Image (cartoon, rainbow, N blue to C red):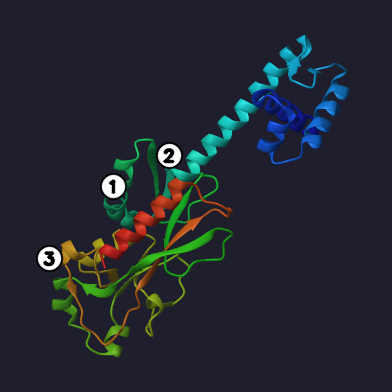
Amino acid sequence: MLDQLRRMAVFASVIRHGSFAAAARQLRTSTSAVSQQIRALETDMGVTLLHRSTRKLSLTPAGERFHSGCAAMVAAAESAQAQLLQLRDAPEGELRIAMTVGFGRRIGPALAPLLAAHAGLTLHLQVEDGFTDLVAHRIDLAIRFGRLPDSAWVAQPLGRLRTSLYASPAYLAQSGVPATPEALQGADWLVLHDGTGAPLRLLGSALTVQPRYTSNNQLTLQQLCEAGLGLAALGDDDVAEAVAAGRLLRLDTELALPELPVWALTPQRDAQPAKVRHAIAALKAHLEDVR
């Protein structure tokens, strides 16, 4: 079947360019190879498609009818290729992003210029702090933080977020400012957690804590921290408004929290669609700007 389709494309090229030699140049092959393809096509179809002379080629009646279908097939293939190249080179279609609730405040500023520049690009956000079934939700790009579990998806670094320890003024007034490692160890901790109940090494730092409060939602942890329930490691940029309003205070301790890596997860593909490439570039630029 594939050989037959190839011969039909060669036949359409011969008619488009007017000779075997011109078609051969276009197809980057030899004139004899083109001639062989046409003869094989005529043999398979059991009809003569072309009248040949030393001066020109002309279609037989059967060839005229057959050529219209061959030309339509080639046109459809060229149109499909053009659409694919357009998707490769220009961001179009629906971009489906999975992300955490807390990252929602960054998506608008990060992607607004991209969406404004490309009217054919639409956006769907799958927002939750659990691990979304990326395949089932047809996700193009998932944004994840910290250490990643093993996955068939490809991880690309987007940037890093600065984190610090925070508590509310009410909590510090009641419990005191934890100034030593021992005081930190004994504090009430709010930790982003998967619910296994095991002691956690805080964001990869030297401090291992048994949290009193856990959640799979970073925004919820911030709200609990503002309510005075304990200490939390939170993104500096995420809590800037709460700090400015006096709802949270940053703790100056000797505990150095590592920056939190941000990752873009994409399906295992040889080439990414333009919409994904442009979104990743926009997110990288935004995270660099807020550092």
Mark nearest the camera among 3 and 1 is 1
- Name the mark on residue 244: 3
- Answer whether labels 3 and 2 touch (C-beta < 8 Å): no
Q: Secondary structure at mark 2?
A: loop
Q: Is residue 40 left or right of residue 86?
A: right
Residue 34: x and y in percent read 78, 33
Chain-order first, disc 3 or disc 1:
1
Disc 3 to disc 1, how far (Cα)? 28 Å
Instruction: Please name the residue shown 54% across and 53% down the image.
Output: 267
Q: Amino acid at mark 3?
A: Ala
Q: Is residue 159 left or right of residue 72?
A: left
Disc 1 to disc 2, how far (Cα)? 14 Å
Location of mark 2 (residue): 92
Q: Quadrant of the N terminus?
A: top right
Mark 3 is surrounded, within 10 Å at the Cα level, by few (under 14), some (14 to 19) or many (20 or more) other residues, namely few
Residue 43: x and y in percent read 88, 23
Location of mark 1 (residue): 113
Q: Amino acid at mark 2?
A: Glu
